[in-house]
Amino acid sequence: MKKILALLLVLALSLTLVACGSGKKDAASTGSYKVAMVTDYGDITDQSFNQTTYEACKAYCSEKSIDFNYFKPASDSDADRVAMIEKAVADGYNVIVMPGYAFANAIKQTVNTYTDVKFVALDVGAGDLNTFNDDGSIKEEFKVPSNLYCAVYQEELCGYMAGYAAVKLGYKNLGFLGGMAVPAVIRYGYGFVQGADAAAQELGQNIDINYFYGGQFYGDANITSRMEGWYSNGTQVVF
């Protein structure tokens, strides 16, 4: 519920942040919005980020009597994400909501082309759009245009509280199993470890944490097997 409320706030803010000084009457200034969501790796029933984004957009647009639809890429690729953004624009949608870090390249390929369209990027920070060298240094800094709104959540706080609470509740053998090792998931994991460690220090006890990224955002036999292995070896709770 808190995630949905946060998304509602992001959408409300994005529809009020328009380019200043352009002198043009576009959709943003007249209020004639059409909102489209493009799904990430999953779909609108994934009980995760896509579903909460979809439900928040649908609820907000229904309340405000704004036309809303969602578009699902044919595959998990930059090309198909770009194709769905272009289809949404061609269908007349002028606010595009994109949930997830995977949209970084698609954003860079479209945001400066469709300057009359407002792009709302969730969990995509301005720094994520830069081009990097192999050593992690910035090769080319991306200039964020006025029609792009980046919203980054503090997942490390949620992770921290989960780890802290688990240890305070008496669990000593913990696990963290994330999806793909993208910035948002990494923040969850690091926060979880730090919260668990802080609680353990307060209680003066030792804890064990198994830590793993599944490399995908859906379950399968290999991931289930790994978790079963953790539990059989004494793990009590997995985030």
Image (spheres, rainbow, N blue to C red):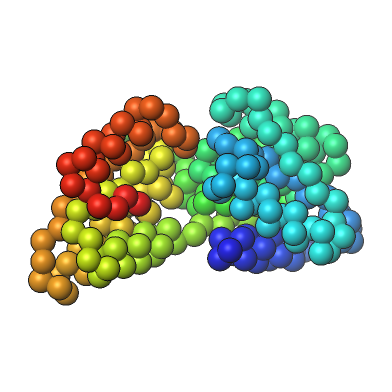
Viewer-nearest residue: 28 or 2 = 2
Evaluate whether residue 188 shows in this view.
yes
Rendered-image quadrant of the N terminus: bottom right
- Left or right side of 238 for 199: left
Which residue is pictured at 60% across the width and 35% down the height?
106
Q: Position of residue 190 (x, y in %)?
A: 30, 54
Q: Which quadrant holds residue 204?
A: bottom left
Q: Is any atom of residue 115 visible in this view? A: no
Q: What residue is at 79 percent from the left and 38 percent from the top?
A: 89
In this orientation, which residue lies closer to the viewer: 131 or 10? 10
Give the total number of marks visible in the rendering: 0
Q: Hey, which residue is sitting farthest bottom in the picture?
A: 202
Is 86 left, or right, of 226 in this rendering? Answer: right
* Between 25 and 49, the one nearer to me in the picture: 49
Residue 68 location, x and y as percent? 80, 49
- Relative side of 171 to 153, left or right: left
Residue 191 x/y as whole percent = 32, 59
Residue 229: x and y in percent read 24, 36
The answer to whether 183 is drawn above or below residue 80 in the figure is below
Question: Which residue is situated farthest in the front direction here?
Answer: 232
Q: Residue at x 47, y 37 (%)?
A: 217
Res 78 → quadrant? top right
Residue depicted at 70% across the width and 45% down the height: 37
Where is 122 relative to 166, above or below?
above
